[in-house]
Image (cartoon, grey):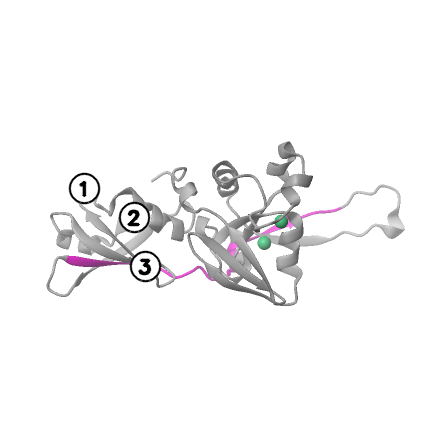
Amino acid sequence: MIRFVPSQLSSLPKADVDCQVTLLDGTTVEGRFHLNRANPYIGGRLLVRWIKTWTRWNQPVDVVVEQVGQGNRLRLRMLGTRPAATQERKRVRRGALRLASVESTRRRREYSAWERDPALRRVVLQAWPQKCQVRGCPSSSTIPPNLLPSVLEVHHVVYVSAGGLDSPLNICLLCANHHTLIHRAPTSEVQRCDAEGVNIAIDGIALAIDRDVAALWKLIDV
Ligand SMILES: [Zn+2]
Ligand SMILES: [Zn+2]
C-alpha cells in the first residue's frame, strides 16, 4: 500500500505526469504518476511493485511528493529508513534437547532468532526455480527435486541482524553449503545487489548469484 502524506493530497497533480521515485537506499527509479480519484497512487503497477520490492514485506510506505523545477515533473521520496536492529523485533525461541536419563551429559541451549515472514519464503519458492542461485552450484543435481523446497535456504543479503529488510530485493535462495560459506567466511563483502543479481566476495573468491526479482512481482499483491 502506497500512502501519500495526508497534508499533500490536495497538491497532487490532476493528470498523469512523469516522476522519479527515490527508494529507501537512495537510488532513483523513473515512472509515471497516475491519479486515481478514489485512491491516488503512483506510476502504475510496475512502479508500485518497484516500491514494494524495497519496502518491508506487506507494510505500508509513506511517500512525500515534491515538484521538480517549474515543469510538471515530480519527485516522490519514500519516508523512513532501513529499520534498525531493535529488541522488539527479536523473538526468543527456546529449544532443548530432551535426552531422557542421561542427566549428567544433558545440556540445555537457549537461542534467539530474528523474525522473518514465512509468506516471503513461500512466494520465493513459487516464483523462482527451486535451486541454489549461486552460478555453477552443483547442489541441484545431487538433491532429489522433491526435497529441494524444504532443503533450500533463504539468505538475506544484508543480514536482518544488521538492519537488512525482510523484502524481495534483499533475499536469495541458497543451498546449505553456500549459505554456511557466506556466513562463516572470515571476510564476506556484498559488492552488488540489484534487480538482476548479487555479487558477494568471500575471501577473494567472487560468488555470482543469479536471481530474477521481476519474477517475484507477478506474485506480489499490489
Ligand atoms: Zn543467510
Ligand atoms: Zn549452492
Q: Which numbered circle lies on residue 72?
A: none
Mark 2 belongs to which amino acid? Leu
Residue at coordinates 39% horizontally, 47% vertically from top-left?
Answer: 59
Q: CA distance from mark 2 to mark 1?
A: 15 Å
Mark in front: 2 vs 1: 2
Q: Secondary structure at mark 1?
A: loop
Other-residue count near label 2 (Cα within 10 Å), few / some / many at <14 / 14–19 / ≥20: some
Give the secondary structure at mark 2. Answer: helix
Residue tagged by mark 1?
36
Circle nearer the viewer, 3 or 1 = 1
Residue 206 point in image, percent of width and height = 57, 62
* Magenta segment boundaries in residue numbering: 73-96
Residue position for label 3: 79
User: Is 100 rendered above or below residue 170?
Assistant: above
Give the amino acid type for the residue marked by disc 1 in the picture: Asn
> Sequence-wise, which precedes: disc 2 or disc 3?
2
Q: Tell me the residue at 79%/43% (across/down).
A: 98
Residue located at (11% from left, 48% from top): 14
Find disc 2 in the rendering and name its residue. 47
Q: Is residue 87 magenta?
A: yes
Picture layout, residue 101 above or below residue 62: above
In this view, the residue in front, 205 or 11, is 205
- Single out the residue that lies furthest toward the top: 146
The quadrant of the rendering that contains the N terminus is top left
Which label's residue is closer to the chain start, 2 or 1? 1
